Amino acid sequence: MIVTIDAREYTVTRPVTGEKYGATEALLWRIARAARKGGHHVNVVANEPEEHFIEGIFWWTPRAFPRKCDVLIACEKLDAIREFTFKTLFAPLNKIDPILADNEGQVDAFVCLSKNHSEVLRSLNPSIHETQCVVIEPGVDAVEQAQKVHNRLIWCNSPDRGLIHIARMWPSLLEKVPDASIVVTYNFARYLKNLLYVADNQATEAMEILEWAAANPESVHIKDGLTDEQVREEQLAAEVYAYPCDPPHAGSMVHCFAAMEAAAAGCAVVLSGVDGLPEVFADVAEYVNDPTDHEAWAEYLAALLTDEERKAALSARSREWASARPWSKHTEGWEALIASAQYEKAVA
């Protein structure tokens, strides 16, 4: 079959085959590879400057691309499906507010990241029926165990999801654990540049985070422009993934790829219990529910960092949990979904 993935919503201003920005691009690659592994001809419509052929997958520019396919996979938006001729339509979602354009009735399956994702999607869009929602969870790569840096924390998410709370709890945490340190692997310089001419709370908090890092050069390490492998090395070096998640939009935290990666790297995972995180990480994470209760977070993290046996136990639990969620399960889910379309059309 011919499978076409319309990924233009993910790549409005950049080519997806260039610099990686985050988990969205990684997930797109996984979907494309899963379709290719199923033996299908795969086209990806993105913001490429010219046509590419990479790993057996055709990558197209946003204006010049093939219009006819058997399966159309429309990422996050349905307003452009009129540009294609297709038999089956799947809509993989990372968000909770896709552009439906009154075309939701044509979708054979909305592919969600978790059960919570499916529930929030339908609560916001009652026109989507429960039978249209399929959950295919993301996976995580297994990694070799490495030497940890004593009392090292890591932040590998967008800063606007709660990094300000780490900054504000930091003085209290250092009082309790003087050798605590943290590495921020998200490209903070790029994030700050995007807010350069913005006058809102997000920009103000970004400047406060910058001042926090400058005031704590021995314990706060912002590392920009890291490759995937370098991020993985930092995750392997960290003992604790502390994520006082404070989502910019209520209901938007339906999953967290970075938490999965940190678990695979043997980090103890500490989260705020917001949105879908307790569902996804119920049996592996520790929780401090209020991300704005900075003293509660500082006390919890200090108790964890100073308890070597507990850190070791949580590290082992994280690795065991992650090992049961390989990317191969995600691939199998997408292979089966696409194959079901082929079977249904053949029977019809």
Image: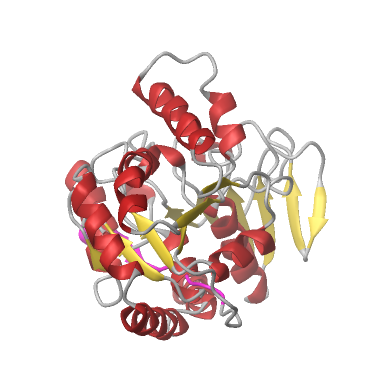
Asked which quadrant contains residue 309, the reply is: bottom left
Q: Residue drawn 49% across and 34% down?
A: 215
Instruction: Confirm whether the magenta stretch covers residue 138.
Output: yes
Quadrant into which the C terminus falls:
bottom left
Asked which quadrant contains residue 202, the reply is: top left
Residue 1 visible at all:
no
Residue 190 vs residue 84, the one in the foreground:
190
Q: Residue drawn 54% across and 65% down?
A: 235
Per the picture, the main secondary structure of the magenta-coloured stretch is loop
Quadrant into which the N terminus falls:
bottom right
The image position of residue 185, as x and y in percent, is: 57, 51
Q: Residue drawn 59% across and 42% down?
A: 187
Asked which quadrant contains residue 189, the reply is: top right
State whether residue 312 is above or below residue 170.
below
Residue 205 visible at all:
yes
State whether residue 113 is above or below residue 208.
below
The image position of residue 110, as x and y in percent, is: 37, 56
Q: Which residues are magenta?
A: 127-141
The image position of residue 277, as x and y in percent, is: 28, 60
State whether residue 127 is above or below residue 114.
above
Q: Residue drawn 50% across and 31% down?
A: 210
Q: How is the image coloured?
A: secondary structure
In the rendered structure, the answer to whether residue 212 lies left or right of residue 252 reads right
Instruction: Confirm whether the magenta stretch covers residue 117.
Output: no
The image position of residue 243, as x and y in percent, is: 35, 54
State whether residue 142 is above or below residue 47.
below
